[in-house]
Structures are given as C-alpha cells and as structure tokens.
Image: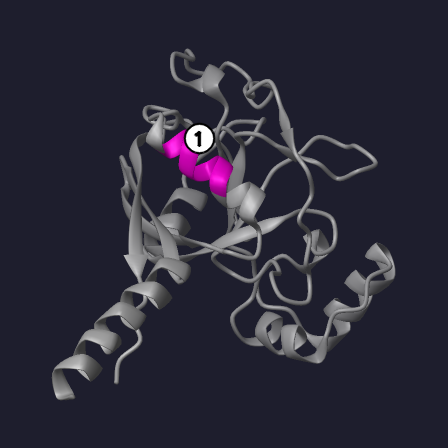
Amino acid sequence: MKLKLLALGILLTFAFASQAQKYRICMKTTMGNVLMELYDGTPKHRDNFVKLAHDHFYDSILFHRVIPQFMDQAGDPDSKQAKKGVGLGDGDVKYKIPAEIQPEKYFHKRGALGAAREDNPAKASSGAQFYIVTGKIFTDSTLEKTEKRTHYKISAANRKVYKTIGGAPHLDNNYTVFGEVLKGMDVVQKIGEVKRDSSDRPIVDVRIIKLRTKRKFLFWWW
C-alpha cells in the first residue's frame, strides 16, 4: 500500500510539474548578468521571447536607449553592427504581438520587463524590442498627477509599490508587462546610469552577450 501511494505521489508530482513550468531568462551583458522570469499570464509574449532566445536572436544586440530613473531598452536587430553615434530603435522583426495588458496584475514596478511598441490603436507590441523599468519613487501627489494625465486609476496595492519600490506608472494600461527581474537589478541600474548621447544611446556600447531560457519546475511536495 505504501509503495502504491508513493508511486501515485510521484506521478501526481510530475503531472502538476508539467502544468507549473516557469520560464526564466538568463541575460549576460557586458556590464553583468540579469535573471528574469516570464509571466504565464502573458503567453503570447512569453512564447515569443522564448523563441527568440532559443534562436539566439538577442546575442550581440545593444541596449540602444537608456534613461535614468525610467528604463533600459534593447532588442533592435540593427544594433548588432551599428557604428558609434548612429541612431537606433527602428529595427524589429516583421510582426507584432497582440496586447496582453493586465495593469492590475502586471504593472510597471521597478524591475518590470515590458514590450516596447510603436503608437497603434490596438497597443500591439513590438515583436522583439523590450525594456526593463528602473523607475523612481512616487508620492500620493505625483501618482494623482499621473492618474489625471493617463486617465487610469492605479489600485491601492500598486500605489503602495510605487511609493516604496518605485517604477514607471505612466506606462500602465498602455504597454504589456510580461516578466520581471529576479536577480541582477543592480546591473540594470548601472546600465541606466551610463553616459549617453542626445538620442539616449550609451556612449560606450552596452551589449547583450547572450540571452538564454532556463525552465524551472515547481514541484508539489507531500
């Protein structure tokens, strides 16, 4: 009987594990390493990012736009061979991803991984370009101003995060957040503080050496 229960437990463990896979992204840059997790609640963005990582799409791509207390942006394929001083940001893959915007659950806190996009009514995301939020701390007063400007009411729980951890609340309800940084936020912060030109491109190139997926299984224990 004990052996049967043990066997059943093992089978159930693997059954639950197959439904509880979490994709993590290991990004090695010229300034250090960053570990990120992709949200299962944004499957289109998750699966696209995983595919690009498997295809080694992001290897050698630059962080082409960084703004202190806001975000670091990368993903332009034209940046791989770009000469210094050349404006970047228009390169992309030949498709967009339907918006998966869920601002109550996935919002622009510090460390959020979001999908960049051009202006479009459907708020569809770039197929390749992404950003990581560095952000800043907000007060009730500055959050109220943000709400008036964006016509979006920030939840009490999210307000608390913006007032303690910080972020970029003006992006909420407009861009898809599909993951977050787990480790290496100090690296993200350093990238956002480098000297940059008038187009916000770093003077000294900050490059993604490689970006790979790492699948984690969440096991149920008895």
**Amino acid marked by disc 1:** Pro
Q: Residues within 10 Å of mark 1 (few under 14, many from 20)?
A: many
For the point 42% across and 30% down, the residue is 52
Residue at (25% x, 77% y) in the render: 9
- The stretch of residues the image draws in magenta is 47-53
Query: Considering only vertical position in the picture, is 216 above or below 87?
Result: below
Going 62% across and 23% down the picture, which residue do you hit? 95
In the rendered image, is residue 66 in sight?
no
**Where in the figure is residue 144, as x and y percent of width and height?**
80, 70
Residue 80 rendering spot, x and y as whole percentages = 39, 17
Label 1 sits on a secondary structure element that is loop
Q: Looking at the rendering, which quadrant does residue 181 occupy?
A: bottom left
What is the quadrant of the C terminus in the image?
A: bottom left
* Farthest-out residue, left: 3
Main SS type for the magenta part? Answer: helix
Q: Which residue is mark 1?
A: 202
**Horizontal side, residue 139 vs residue 144: left or right:** left
Q: Quadrant of residue 30?
A: top left
Say which residue appears at 28% left-offset and 40% top-offset: 31
Q: Is residue 59 above or below residue 103?
A: above
Is residue 11 something one can see in this rendering? yes
x, y percent for residue 175: 68, 47
Q: In the image shown, does 96 or 73 lie closer to the viewer?
A: 96
Residue 107, percent from left and from top: 62, 61
